[in-house]
Amino acid sequence: MALYYDDDQAMLADSASEFMREEGGIAKQLRHWRDRNCKDGFGHALWEQFGEMGFIGILLSEEDGGLGMGQVEANIVLEEIGANLTPSPFLSSSVLAATALKHGSNDTRGRWLPDLVAGKNVYAVAIDEGPKHRPETIACKAEKSGNGFKLTGKKDFVVYGASAEMIVVAARTSGSDSDADGITLFAVPQDASGMSHDSVRLVDSSMASHITFDGVELDADAVIGDVDGGREVLNAMLRAGRVGAAAEGVGVARGAMDMTVDYLKQRKQFGELIGSFQALQHRAAHLYSEVEIARAVVMKAAQLLDAGSEQAELMISVAKAKVAKAAGLAVREGVQMHGGIGMTDEYDVGLYMKRDRALQEFLGDQYYHAGRVAELSGY
Amino acid sequence: MADLDQFREETRSWLEANCPPEMRQPVEDEADVYWGGRNATFKNEAQKAWFEACVAKGYTVPAWPKEYGGAGLSPAEAKVLREEMARIDARSPLHSFGIWMLGPALLHFGTEGQKQRFLNEIARGEIRWCQGYSEPGSGSDLVSLQTYGDDKGDHWVVDGQKIWTSYADEADWIFCLVRTDKTNKYQGITFMLFDMASQGVSTKPIKLISGSSPFCETFFDSVSVPKSYGEDIPAQVGQVNRGWDVAKYLLGHEREMISATGGVDRPTSLGAVTSRQGELDPVLRAEIAQFDVDALAFTAMSEKFLDEIKVGKAHPAQPNMMKYAGTELNKRRNELLMAAGGSRALEWESEETEGGKPARGWLRTKGNSIEGGTSEVMLNVVAKRILELPGA
Ligand SMILES: Cc1cc2nc3c(=O)[nH]c(=O)nc-3n(C[C@H](O)[C@H](O)[C@H](O)COP(=O)(O)OP(=O)(O)OC[C@H]3O[C@@H](n4cnc5c(N)ncnc54)[C@H](O)[C@@H]3O)c2cc1C
C-alpha cells in the first residue's frame, strides 16, 4: 500500500481540516472552555457535530452505525485535532472505548454504541494505576459476586472520566498483578454506586480522573468480551490508542512548527527577518525533517495495524516514541524561537507545548516505548 | 589557609546562631523568597530575623565593601560563606535585581555619591529595582531601542515603552535604557535611574504560560526624570550617551546570575530525586544518568567560573557561555522531572501537586533561555568574542 492518502482519504483530510479549523479552532474551543473553567474541558455541542460529521463512529462497522473505516482514517481526524488543539473525547471515546466495544456482544454494542455515534455520550477508559503507564501490571480487582462481579481498586489518568457516561475498566479477575492473563474488561456506567472520581484539570486544560472503586457491583453483562480474556482486547485498544495519540502528536508538531516558521518570516531584529539567520534556518529545516519522519512512521504503523500485520506492534511503539521526540522538539523550538512572546499565555505557541506534554504521557512516553522497541526487537 | 579555616569556624558558628531552622530549607516558591522594597512584607518571623541578621553583618552582599553595606569579604572568604550556607541549605536572605545587576554596575561605573546612597539602600533591601531594557521592537537587538529622553536642561522628559519588565508592578525604582541621541546608535543611550512612582509611569502585567504574571508592559508618558538626586548623585550611571557600556557590563552579571539555574551548589543528583517516586523505566533512568553526568560536570564548571571571575581570570565573555549551558541544563532537568512525575505531574490545580507546581515550574524554565539574552544570542557572542570567528 502506498504511503500517501488515496482520493477518499485526501477528501477526508480536507473536510477534517476545514472542520477543525472552523469549528474546533483554539479561540472557539480550547480558550473558550479553559477561560470559563469548564468542568468538562470540552464542548458537548462540538462533540455532537463530530457525530454529524461521522467522525465518532469512524472505526465502527456500518452495522454499528459507523463508517467502517480504519486506523489510517481515524488518524487523519486526529492529526487535525492535534494541529488545532481541539479539545474532544475523540481519542478516548472513538478510538480506545470504541475499539473495546467492537469486541462486545450484540447486547453490549446495542446498549452503548448508538448514543456514542450520535455524539450524545462520551466514554472513557481506565487503564493506568499510577503516574506512569504500566499496563503490564493490573491490580484493580473484580471478584465474582452473585451472578456478577465486585470491583475494587484505583485507576489514574482517566481522561474525561468525570464527563463519561461509561468507563471501560481493565480489571483483574484471576492471577497475580503482573500476569498477562486473567484480565477482564468491564463497561462501568457513570452511576455505578461505589465509584468515586477525583477529577483534576491538567496542564493542557483537559480533565482527568483518579477513580476509586469501592466494591462496585456489576452485572455479568458489564463484561466486554470474555472473562479472563481481556488482555487481547486491551492490547487492541492500546495499539489503536497509541498510534492515534501519535497521530495527534504529529498534528501538534505541525501546528507549532507552522506558527514558528510564520513567525520567522515576520519578526525583525537587527534590521532583518529573524528567518534570515542561518542559525535559525538550520534548526527550522531540521525540525521539518523530524516532523516529516514522524508523520511517515505514524502512517506506516497505522497501515500495518489496519492490515493486521505482526510488524504493527513494533512500529506503533516506534511511532509513539518518534513523535514524542519530534513534537517535543517542535514545541520547544516553537517557544524558544518566539522569544519573550512565546512565554506569554496570550500567544498560542505555549498551548501547543502544554498539549504535547499531556500527549507525551498518554499511553506511554518515549522512554517506555523505546524500551518496548528494545524488547520487541529481542534485546 | 589557616586564616580561612578560622573564618570557616566563625562562619559556621555565626550561621548556627543566626540562621533559623525554617530558613534552612530549599526555596519552594515565590512566597519563600524575600525581595525587599518599600512595600515588602515578611512571610514569617524566621524570614525577618534571618534577613535582619544578614543586613547587620553585611551578608546580603558579603563581597561588597563595608561602607556600602557589605561585609568586605575577599573572594576566598565569600566562597567559604557560600559553601557553609549551602551545607546547611541556608536560603539567600534577599533576592534583588539591585544585588545581582545594578549593584555591580554601580560599583564599577557609579560616582561615590551614587554608591553611598544606592548600594546601601540595596544592601538593606529598602529599594526594589526593575530592569527596563527590552522593548517591543528591541529584544535581541537591544541597541535599537527607541524609548526617548528629551533633554530639558535640568531634567529629561522620557517617552516610550518597555516590555517583559520583570516585577515592574512591584518595583520601587527602575534602571532604564533611554535613547538621548537619535543620531548615534551605540553612543546615544543613557543608563537612567528613576522612581516608578513618577508621574507618567504605568505598568500592565503580562501573564506567562505558567499562569503567573511576573512581568509587565511598562509605559512612559512624558515622565520627568531629574538629572540629579543630590550632590554627586546624577540620575544616570556612567556618562550621558555612554549607557551602552554600562548596560553590557550589567548583562555580564545578569548572565552570571542566571547561569546558576544550571545548579551551582545543587548537591543531589537528579536520579536520586526522581527515584524516590518509584522505579524508573530503564530508558528514562539512562537518560537521567546522562543528565547527571552533564549536571555534575557543570557544577564543577560553575565553581571554577566563579573562582576565576572574581579575580579577573575568566574571559570577559565567559558569562555568556555559562548562561547558555546553565539554562539549557535547567530546561532539560525539568523535562526529565516531568517525565519521572508522569501523569501526576501534569496536574494544574490539584492539592497533591500544590496547585500544579511541577508543571508550572517546568513551563517557567522555558523562559530561562530567553530572559537576559537568548541562547542564540549567547552562542553568537561566544562565537564572536571568544572564538573570534569571522563575520560573526
Ligand atoms: C521570563 C522573562 C523575564 C524577562 N525579564 C526582563 C526584564 O526584567 N527586563 C527586560 O528588559 N527584559 C526582560 N525580558 C526580555 C528578554 O530579555 C527578551 O525577551 C530577550 O532578550 C529576547 O528578545 P525578544 O523577546 O524580543 O525576542 P527576539 O529578539 O525577537 O528573538 C526571537 C528569536 O530570534 C532569535 N534571534 C534573534 N536574533 C538572532 C540572531 N542574530 N541569530 C540567531 N537567532 C536570533 C532569538 O534568539 C529568538 O529565538 C524577559 C524575558 C523573559 C522570557
Image: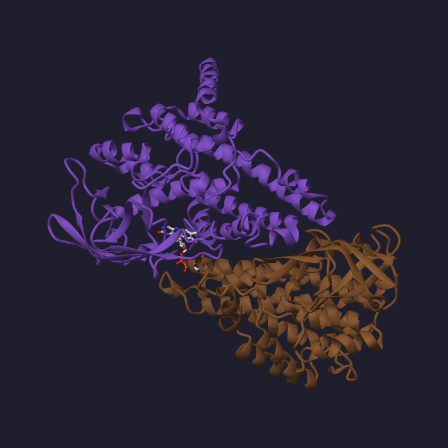
Query: Would residue B41 appear left or right of A372 to someone viewing this image?
Result: left
Rendered view: A131 above or below B65? below
Q: Nearer the viewer, residue B243 or A19?
A: A19
Task: Give x and y (percent) for residue B163.
Answer: 35, 56
The quarter of the picture where residue B127 lies is top left
Q: Nearer the viewer, residue A314 or B188?
A: A314
Colour of chain A in the image = brown
| Residue at screen point 45% across, 47% down | B382
Query: Would residue B141 appear left or right of A80 to someone viewing this image?
Result: left
**Quadrant location of ligand 1?**
bottom left
Rendered view: A113 above or below B182? below
Task: Give x and y (percent) for residue A31.
Answer: 50, 67
Residue B317 appears in the picture as rendered = yes
Query: Would residue B127 appear left or right of A37 to someone viewing this image?
Result: left
Chain letter corresponding to the colour purple: B
Q: Which of A355 and A246 is in front in this view?
A: A355
The quarter of the picture where residue A19 lies is bottom right
Rendered view: B364 above or below A60? above
Task: Give x and y (percent) for residue B36.
Answer: 35, 38
Task: Give x and y (percent) for residue A96.
Answer: 73, 68
Rendered view: B303 above or below B291? above
